[in-house]
């Protein structure tokens, strides 16, 4: 009877988590499947967490529920949201951090064969969208940026691309995390053919990233690559030499930015790098574009109610972290940061024994945190799924021992 229950639990987790990840990744499915169903699939995965034998996991689940309840109350009392809208914000917090449980329990409950099956299903889904989007980008170089527009306000032209499973903003930044995964495997692998295959995918993903013309995506992914290289260095001397090399590049940073403008002269990236170089030369962050102005405007609203927030009217901070700060104050932001740091601590606890695993986990968390600061990714659930679940799944599939 116990073996039968374990069998059912194992297959149940496999189907629920894999299906939910695919649902959130495929643009066409997100267009057709109601929002309630998408959220319901994710919330459903919380049920077995509450009865999980691992006290570490159970405690985090109650912390997540308690903090989500606080956000419900905060949005209702301080932001004057309706009860439905406040509940939606609380559920958003839940949905952001639920994949942390997947990243642990999925590996504990499933055997290696099911983990690999899930990995290949999700991997095939990502590659399928990637090649379709590459084709669309060659036809329309701006399509990934145009698809960043909300489905609620976009026209039939853009929705037609989504129905063809052309990836937009969320998928593009998901590819950034996939790039870190594959490059990490390139660094730690001892097999020549495996290294060549990993290098091929890194080049393919970078080709895609450049075509999307997202400067933040290119910079964050490159920063993650540098972080992985540094974390893979084994001696203090090589690490010092690496730091000196980075400082040398920064010293000639202005010249490097000018060079990048020429390299990407036929791309929107050229304008972005020109803005960065102009900002460095003038010392004015406003030369970076409209984003700093939006953040400063939001922070001016926050100052009038710094502890509990509530000044959300006409808020367009273009930053998830800044938005949380303005809407829920220091209390809300500190609680959100607690969940984020706690998520890292939990995943770190279970993956610490895998050689170099924390190098990838740490850089992925830094990537997502910086992205949360520079972009409004509150409802881009593909990104926490990629960071909290796909990254640990990638590590575990290529690890020989089962995580306990």
Image: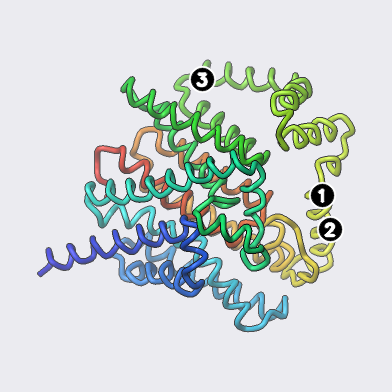
The CA span between labels 3 and 1 is 41 Å
Which label sits in the foreground, 2 or 1? Answer: 1
Decide which of tag 2 and tag 3 comes sooner along the chain.
3
Question: Label 3, on which residue?
Answer: 236
The CA span between labels 2 and 1 is 11 Å
Question: Label 1, on which residue?
Answer: 290
Of the pair 157 and 390, the residue shown nearer to us: 157
Cβ–Cβ under 8 Å for marks 2 and 3: no
Question: Label 2, on which residue?
Answer: 297
Q: Position of residue 294 (x, y in %)?
A: 80, 55
Q: Position of residue 301 (x, y in %)?
A: 82, 64
Decide which of tag 2 and tag 1 comes sooner along the chain.
1
Give the SS element for disc 3: helix
Q: Is 25 drawn above or below residue 31 in the view shown? A: above
Q: Position of residue 149 (x, y in %)?
A: 66, 58
> Dot 1, how many residues are within 10 Å of its Cα: few (below 14), some (14-19), or many (20+)?
few
Which residue appears at 41% of the width and 69% of the height? 41
Please tell me how many numbered marks the rendered image carries.
3
Decide which of tag 3 and tag 1 comes sooner along the chain.
3
Horizontal side of residue 89 vs 184, given as left or right: right
Give the SS element for disc 2: helix
Of the pair 135 and 353, the residue shown nearer to us: 135
Q: Which quadrant of the view contains residue 50?
A: bottom left
């Amino acid at each position: 009877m116990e073996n039968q229950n374990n069998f059912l639990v194992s297959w149940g987790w496999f189907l629920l988590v894999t299906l939910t990840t695919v649902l959130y990744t495929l643009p066409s499915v997100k267009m057709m499947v109601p929002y309630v169903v998408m959220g319901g699939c994710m919330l459903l995965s919380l049920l077995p967490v509450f009865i999980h034998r691992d006290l570490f996991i159970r405690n985090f689940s109650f912390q997540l529920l308690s903090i989500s309840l606080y956000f419900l109350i905060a949005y209702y009392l301080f932001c004057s949201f309706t009860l439905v809208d406040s509940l939606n914000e609380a559920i958003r917090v839940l949905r952001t951090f639920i994949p942390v449980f997947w990243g642990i329990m999925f590996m504990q409950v499933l055997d290696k064969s099911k983990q690999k099956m899930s990995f290949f299903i999700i991997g095939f889904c990502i590659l399928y969208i990637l090649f379709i989007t590459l084709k669309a980008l060659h036809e329309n170089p701006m399509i990934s940026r145009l698809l960043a527009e909300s489905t609620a306000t976009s026209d039939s032209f853009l929705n037609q691309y989504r129905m063809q499973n052309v990836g937009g903003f969320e998928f593009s930044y998901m590819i950034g995390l996939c790039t870190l995964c594959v490059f990490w495997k390139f660094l730690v692998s001892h097999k020549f053919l495996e290294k060549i295959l990993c290098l091929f995918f890194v080049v393919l993903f970078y080709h895609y990233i450049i075509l999307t013309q997202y400067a933040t995506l290119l910079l964050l992914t490159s920063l993650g690559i540098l972080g992985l290289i540094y974390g893979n260095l084994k001696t203090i001397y090589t690490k010092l030499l690496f730091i000196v090399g980075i400082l040398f590049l920064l010293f000639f940073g202005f010249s490097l930015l000018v060079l990048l403008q020429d390299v990407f002269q036929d791309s929107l990236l050229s304008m972005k790098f020109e803005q960065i170089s102009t900002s460095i030369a003038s010392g004015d962050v406003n030369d970076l574009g409209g984003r700093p102005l939006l953040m400063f405007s939001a922070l001016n609203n926050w100052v009038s109610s710094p502890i509990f927030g509530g000044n959300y009217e006409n808020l367009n901070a273009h930053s998830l972290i800044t938005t949380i700060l303005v809407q829920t104050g220091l209390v809300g932001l500190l609680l959100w940061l607690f969940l984020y740091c706690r998520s890292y601590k939990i995943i770190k606890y279970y993956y610490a024994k895998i050689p170099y695993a924390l190098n990838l986990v740490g850089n992925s968390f830094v990537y997502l945190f910086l992205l949360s600061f520079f972009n409004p990714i509150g409802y881009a659930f593909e990104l926490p799924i990629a960071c909290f679940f796909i990254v640990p799944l990638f590590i575990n599939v290529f690890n020989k021992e089962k995580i306990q």
